[in-house]
Amino acid sequence: MPLTLPPLNSLRAFEAAARTGSFVAAAEELGVSPAAISQHIRKLEDFLGKDMFMRMNNRVSLTDAGHAILLGTAEALQQISQTTQELTSDRSRSQLVISSIDSVAEKWLLPRLVDYARAQPEFRFDLRVEADPIDFARHNVDLRLGYGTGHYPDLQVRPLTRDKVQPLCSPAYLRQNPAVQQGGMAEVQGRDLLNTSWGPSFGSNPTWAGWFLRAKLPAPEVGGFQVARSSLALDMAREGLGVALAQRMLGAADLTAGRLVALSPICLDLGYPYCLAYPPSKARKRGLMALVEFLVKAAKTLEDDEV
């Protein structure tokens, strides 16, 4: 029985307009004029005998019929795109596009991808560093490591671990500050505190004020250094510049190697866990689920080591 299919270009225009909510934005994405998008949508509506959109000035919203068509169209187009890439590029058959928030990519994810690549010689990856949320379809992302579960409600989400922060410093800093070596955090001066600006990807912002409150210690006056990434705070602590309220997940290698030490066992939990997210249609892509299970196991090992 022959397939009953609408024009493919019309479907592409429809999916882009539905996702962006604008014929103009869809035109920019597909590299055509807004008039061309409108013509494609009209052709699809004529083919189906249904109105796909309600037009409202420069914005459009889906009708009930539009919603019904979109349910299958977006995933089908994604699958066609993926299959086409696999057939036309040998590299794409084994390369996974992986996206991650910045410090986790540098301090935790990349070392594990390196380990995985050494064990799987055919494995290749394209690692991108960007803030939540991301557009999976537009940038053809296979796997995302992000913070919290709320950014991607329509995707498959696997929690990794809920990290915690703890005061960390270098042995060199302790040698330079014998009072801190003897008295711990109660002797740390405000000028030696390393502060992290957590940024928009984080729904909780652990602070030194919160830590001192939890530890029931008087908080020193706010001072010290300010950096934009938690990985930089770890680097500065390792260089002996002060004490970082640092993530244990990101500092695990330095703690194990003795490049950093914990000044107190008291920790603050981050508000949400780190999670892996991927579109359901991507689960069939070569190597993706094996990598997901590897990373989940690696995060579980980290948790077991802390117990």
Image (cartoon, rainbow, N blue to C red):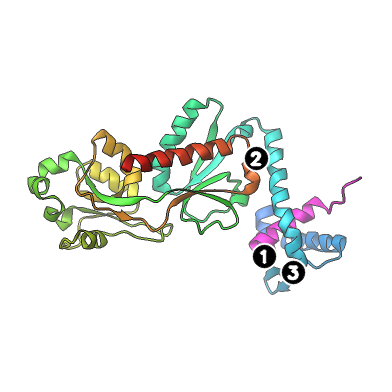
Please give the name of the residue rendered at 87% of the width and 47% of the height, measured from the top-left corner.
3
| Residue 86: assigned label | none
| Magenta span dominant secondary structure | helix
Please give the name of the residue rendered at 43% of the width and 38% of the height, measured from the top-left corner.
298
Q: Quadrant of the N terminus?
A: top right
| Residue 284: assigned label | 2
| Residue 63: assigned label | 3
Q: Nearer the viewer, mark 1 or mark 2?
A: 2
As drawn, which residue projects farthest toward the right?
A: 1
SS label for mark 2 = helix
Residue at which label 1 appears: 22
* First in sequence: mark 2 vs mark 3: 3
Residue type at tag 2: Arg
Question: Residue 58 magenta-drawn?
Answer: no
* Residue 56 visible in the snapshot: yes
Q: Nearer the viewer, residue 300 or 240?
A: 300
Residue type at tag 3: Thr
Are the residues flagged by discs 1 and 2 in contact, CB closer than 8 Å? no
Neighbour class for label 1 at 10 Å: few (<14), some, many (≥20)? many
SS label for mark 1 = loop
Please give the name of the residue rendered at 45% of the width and 32% of the height, measured from the top-left corner.
114
Please give the name of the residue rendered at 69% of the width and 74% of the height, measured from the top-left corner.
57
Question: Residue 18 magenta-drawn?
Answer: yes
Are the residues flagged by discs 3 and 1 in contact, CB closer than 8 Å? no
Q: Taking 86 as reference, is 148 left or right?
A: left
